[in-house]
Image (cartoon, rainbow, N blue to C red):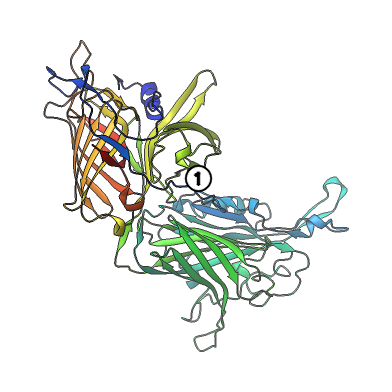
Amino acid sequence: MRVHLKTTLSVLVGAILLNACASGKGGFELDNVNSLNTQGASQNSAPTPTTTPKTPTYQDEQNTRRTLDVDTQEPALGYAVEVPRRVFAMRDTPPEELTVNIMPDKVKPTNHRLEDLPKVFSETLVEHPKYVEDSLSYSHDVKSKDAIRDLQFVRSGYVIAEKGIEFDRTGGVFRQNPAGQYGHVFYQGVNPATALPTTNATYQGTWDFVSNAISTRRDLPEGFTNDLMNYGAKGNTVGATSLDADVNRGHDNDKPTGLKSTFEVNFADKKLTGKFTQNHGATNENAEQTITDRYSVEATLKGNRFVGTANAMNKEHAIFGQNGALEGGFFGAKAEELGGKFLAEDGSLFGVFAGKRGVVDKVQTQFDATAIDSKTLTKTNMDTFGQASHLVIDGKRVSLLPEGVSSFADMKFIDTHQVAHGDKKLSITVCCNNLDYVKFGGYGTVGGTADTPVLSDGKLFLVGERTDTSAIPTSGTAHYRGTWEGYIDSKDGRRWTSSASDLTTGTRSRFDVDFGSKSLIGKLIADNGLEDNPVLTLNGTITGNGFSGTAKTGVNGFNLDPNSTGASAIAHINAGFYGGFYGANASELGGVIHHDKAGEDKIGVVFGGKRQTNTP
């Protein structure tokens, strides 16, 4: 344990560096325990060690260890593609200027606030010297019925304008930069789901697209029109978009409008099916309307994401003829909406989609992702893609596994590694190698020099994939052992820091769970502390696959610095905690203790544990 004034350096280092002297055994089993003699102590602080008689031996319950899948598509909160454009020589056009495909490296991840749309895309469009005045189109501008998209957590569509033709003679070659559409097709989600419906749900929404630009595409494809954009053959010099599609925009009728998406999601079986439909133009209410299914969709749920295929219904279609790899996710805390993308196998088309579900009877918490600021002890919800193996920071995944390792069982009990993340480097410390479905620890930004590194923006974190409620035992008891990490701040500005450990006398967590009575009792014990004199005692109630309750210090509080010759720093903690069960049949647990009310003693703690077997 460490006690100090809350200087910036100590706060940041405490968030990142877990116990460096962990034994590395990879379990929470208990051998002979070096306990502490607390006679004469007025608070639960730590005096002199003595040896207690050997206690029953606890060992981690043996489960099949998890090997993590390699994702074929990198999840993100959003993606965008710029409308392809052929800038080509007017004579002797080289092959590379005849076709501009949409290759994977042109599909860029995004992390925009929804309130910043469409500005983040439109600013550069209207500033272009060849911008055509008043030509900006935004898929959510509600100027027509097909642009009324009632979504709270997802934006999916386009920000497109028109520009005039340009010519260039650089290098002695006369090149044309054609007139036509320019801009982006994109989707952007916020607030990834942490709870999912337990039964089937139907999502309905829209889809949009942009094609490649290829010189051999000269005829007007079936289902396309020149009504809005008339700059030559669709998809020839610039990519064709949703604005080129023949769709009912609802100006003179109440018939189905635009490009529509429909999805059926079986959350129990983790399957998603759906279709992308084109509702062709209708001149009035009495006119006959053609409706064409362009793609069928099949996908498998992974966490709060899904991965699958968009299958072209007409393989001969000039624009919509190729199958594509599809990926997306659920957004809103209760998966109220979904959004995603697909990319044709040959790079000929990029599509985006979104949808909103109807009312469902029940949702179940599936994922946890929490951060506690190491300086202020402010608690926030982190984004998550439903994976205990990764954090999501600034909209991008960060692996909790060191490079080259595919199983938590193969890492150190407490592992610290650094990863490049955008324009910065992160240091991440993660516990514990015997836990597969819940992870906790700390991370921060690495600065300074190689000789004198400095860590900033420190956070504690906990992420987990919860046990399905149906797999939570309904009777019997279980004992869990683990460790914990965190801070206690006294009202006078002193801080006590605890780091995770797998030493038998290190920082320990102990939990007794009665599934029949739905109760939980826990203890968080300090490094070299007595189990019958814990820092905190927890009493909670089980609800579904989670639990919540109150964590308290003893009657006399907790002495943050028992060795101090000055005035004692006694903290009295009465804080809420919450957590969940993780893994097969609730084999793991974890949670968060937090209280940061001004003028009171504060606490920020993350903890975890593994179910034990007992050999007398």
Relative vertical location of residue 381 with respect to residue 211 in this rendering, above or below? above
95 or 136: nearer the viewer: 95
* Residue at the image point whose x is 22% and y is 30% from the top: 55
Specify whether 479 is left or right of 67: left
> Is 57 on the left or on the right of 358, as rendered?
left
Is there any visible trace of residue 136 in the rendered image?
no
Count of numbered circles in the view:
1
Tag 1's secondary structure?
strand
The furthest residue to the top: 565
Across and down, in percent, residue 93 comes to: 84, 58
Which quadrant, please, contains the N terminus? top left
The quadrant holding residue 521 is: top left
Amino acid on which disc 1 is placed: Lys
Q: Quadrant of residue 290?
A: bottom right
Instruction: Determine the residue located farthest toward the front in the rendered image.
Output: 616
In front: 417, or 392? 417
Instruction: Give the image location of residue 611, x and y in percent.
Output: 30, 43
Q: Is residue 118 left or right of residue 536?
A: right
Task: Estimate how packed mark 1 is, as few (under 14), some (14 to 19) or many (20 or more) residues with alpha carbons within 10 Å.
Answer: many
**Residue 385 seen in the current view:** yes
State the image coordinates of residue 448 (x, y, percent, origin top left).
Answer: 51, 22
Q: Which residue is mark 1?
A: 396
> In which quadrant will I find the C terminus?
top left
Q: Position of residue 354 (x, y in %)?
A: 48, 64
Depth check, front residue: 24 or 215: 24
Is 287 placed above or below 243 here?
below
